[in-house]
Amino acid sequence: MKSVFKKSLSLTVLASSLLSLGASAAPANDPATLGQIRDSAMNSDWAYERLADLTDLVGPRLSGSVGAQAAVEQVSAAMRKLGAKVTLQPVKVPHWVRGEEKAEVVEYAGRPNGVTQKVVLTALGGSGATPAAGLTAPVIVVHSFEELKAKGAQVKGSIVLFDVAFDQEMADRGQAGPAYGAGSRIRTQGPRLAAEMGAAAALVRSVGGANYRIAHTGATGLVDGARIPAAAVTAEDAMLMSRLSARGPLKLHLTLTPQTLPDADSFNVIADWPGTDKADEVVIVSGHLDSWDLATGAHDDGTGVAGAMGVIETLKKLDLHPRRTIRVIAWMNEENGTRGGKAYFEANKDKLDKHFAAIESDEGGGRPFGFIASVTPQMVKYFAPLKTALDPIGAGVFQRHDQAAGADIGPLERAGVPSFQPLVDASFYFSYHHTPADTLDKVSPLELKRHVAVMTSLSWFLANMDENIGRVAKTD
Amino acid sequence: MKSVFKKSLSLTVLASSLLSLGASAAPANDPATLGQIRDSAMNSDWAYERLADLTDLVGPRLSGSVGAQAAVEQVSAAMRKLGAKVTLQPVKVPHWVRGEEKAEVVEYAGRPNGVTQKVVLTALGGSGATPAAGLTAPVIVVHSFEELKAKGAQVKGSIVLFDVAFDQEMADRGQAGPAYGAGSRIRTQGPRLAAEMGAAAALVRSVGGANYRIAHTGATGLVDGARIPAAAVTAEDAMLMSRLSARGPLKLHLTLTPQTLPDADSFNVIADWPGTDKADEVVIVSGHLDSWDLATGAHDDGTGVAGAMGVIETLKKLDLHPRRTIRVIAWMNEENGTRGGKAYFEANKDKLDKHFAAIESDEGGGRPFGFIASVTPQMVKYFAPLKTALDPIGAGVFQRHDQAAGADIGPLERAGVPSFQPLVDASFYFSYHHTPADTLDKVSPLELKRHVAVMTSLSWFLANMDENIGRVAKTD
């Protein structure tokens, strides 16, 4: 239908935009339009090209870094080029900088003269520093907070190693999120608990699958005044220290020299594709723009950002204009502070009734099967046309949950805004997540097309729904 | 049979050794004895414990290092403890020491101001050094020697990157060795060719599977006077530089500071389990004791050494004494010089007729299916009882090839000594090989038991054969 109009017109800009208005005034969620959106996304390399720009040209983009600023500029420029209305929302972000990081086991039972064992590790975001020449201390291996607490005074002056294996089998069963949750609880809370008990430093076994002696970084919850050195060791090195510990006492020499600098200026990139008759209502579709510093954050969360950007590219190509405004947001600072999400919420907390829905993609670019949504149970039936439109690419699953928000839109969801995320195969996601291996080559161009199809179809559908989707129950 | 004797005796040491002689004078390759060997090996943790000692207590053991010397002492002590006759054969070995190694792409088309891209790499054994502050040069990406040669004068002063992907599909089809051979040809010859053309440095894409941004080291064939810096980059970083190169010219800042020190004193560890009536004839069963410095060499070649050591442990436990002497050798310097194998050949070249056969295991501790043997075609039928004995553990395959020798026993094979190696599943071997991830946790204790069963059964069978196995045709 659209293409017929297109041929007969494209005479003047004015005529063209009148047509657009006319087109989007037609039944917005009709199967033909949803089909066009899906097919256009499945035939476009645009999002993958943006992901390549982001990862190859900008690369790592930890909050406060020159890469983060370059990413803000690159994404803004790409969105402006499509004709979106771009706003940069200022956000003060933590500015933590990785330093030297190395360790070796220097004493253990059965050690040949002159021999030491290297330990591969990487500092956790927010880690304190050792002296420049490092520190040497006994290692205590524990497997739970309870076991650590039972060690009592022995912890003082020691290096605590939390040797808790990531449950890859759970991830393989489709429960990657909960598997990660269990592990990241150790990473975020363990070092702080160790610090409270007087530990000299804390190590956690890397939270993630794939054992190729790579360390998985991530944020840890240390507080000023007790900011001990904290690092993730590889699965292999955790196992090594556990085995050596079974032979007798061991000591580690540890050097970590990260710095916590003053908060830096940064931005959420907000790109609006304006609505028509309900332009004051907003559907957010988003990913986070910052990444860890070890890699180029292709899956975490380059695919989320590129997927969201692809929404506007798809609608522009089809000359489609939704009733509600579709707001693409590339969040800043999801990884170590969620300051972007918090700043947006603060700035919009008196306009929450105008936030119809929010989508965030932040579980990688694995194959999408559909959606997770925190809508009320009564609303599920209204999404049937969307499911039908996405079934041909295997993405018609619709799962309702009480919580469906990514970290950045969490405050919106908790305030009642219905939230959505793509339901993806994340079985391998935590193998690359927060490691040096989260690079472009790991992203399937085909799955990213599916990702854009899902994100665009969902955004469009929400932005044009006749039904009032309502508010979700508060979850805290 | 053996166990019946055992109960009735074990009275005095003298009586016990008389019995041993009596036992081994019985039909040596009878099914019952072969079955005892297989079952004893399948029920022993001894070899795995030795592998744990070697990898956890000694760790990396590159030729010339303190670890290599500790390994010589540890293995000698373990063999002496079993009652083997241990000799240390002096070997002068190369002494190459890894230094600092880092790189970043500092110029490329589309580079945001202030941004650079880190490249993960590791120096190749024998690499020369850059200045301490590194060097900066344009990168030329090539995919073959022919493509490099076609670049001509452009190569002078440049950093050449050989971007040739490892053929993992070939490895998965059971052709891991040839897949590695194709890749290692680039690694060993490429940097030398680049040096001859005036390159400032040479990089190769890591030779091996598994893309977790880990670099695979290995020896390269540079010569004094043209010892340019040479390193392996990860698959990811090779792909990154290729993609950036497609956007325009790029420059790399490269720092590699390895040192080539004077040759060091080291040893082959030779442990004899003496024969009875043909004690002057020798069956070698071996692995190499040195490893690369990045990891603890669990698969390369800890499992080979532990598997060979397990031969004596199994025979001792069963109180079995072969007709020919079984000689366990832990070779020194397979990785970067093969000096141990060469030294043994030089010292024994007038006793080759007394070398009945040689076995080397150096393709990792994956599941063994049987053997590869460079016997003459007419000899194959005589191995039927061995195949029958190993069928119950799935290791009864016998493949004849013209070449079956590992690197250390290569000179013996080329001089006519029939050579053997276990036929193993090596599909994953080159994922860990020469990387930091070649660690104990990657070795299956069950497969190592099968490995010992195979190595011991084969050694015993060869040491007791009535048939003269004959000489193989010279292969060069």
Image (spheres, coloured by chain):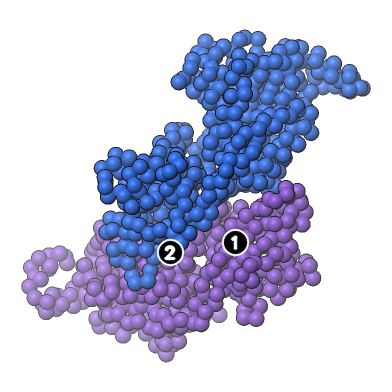
Chain colours: A blue, B purple
In this rendering, position of residue A317 left or right of residue B272 = right
Reply above or below: B334 against A219: below
Q: Which residue is mark 2?
A: B297
Q: Are marks 1 and 2 in contact (CB under 8 Å)?
A: no
Chain letter for mark 2, please.
B
Q: Position of residue B137 (x, y in %)?
A: 72, 64
Q: CA distance from mark 1 to mark 2?
A: 23 Å
Task: Identify the residue at horizontal 28%, vertical 74% (top origin).
Answer: B77
Q: Which residue is mark 1?
A: B102
Residue type at the position of mark 1: Lys
Q: Crowding near pointer 2: few (<14 within 10 Å), some, many (20+)?
A: many
Residue type at the position of mark 2: Gly
Reply above or below: B458 against A2: below
Q: Position of residue B141 (x, y in %)?
A: 71, 60
Most extreme residue toward the right, as rendered?
Answer: A11
Secondary element under disc 2, as helix, strand or loop, is loop
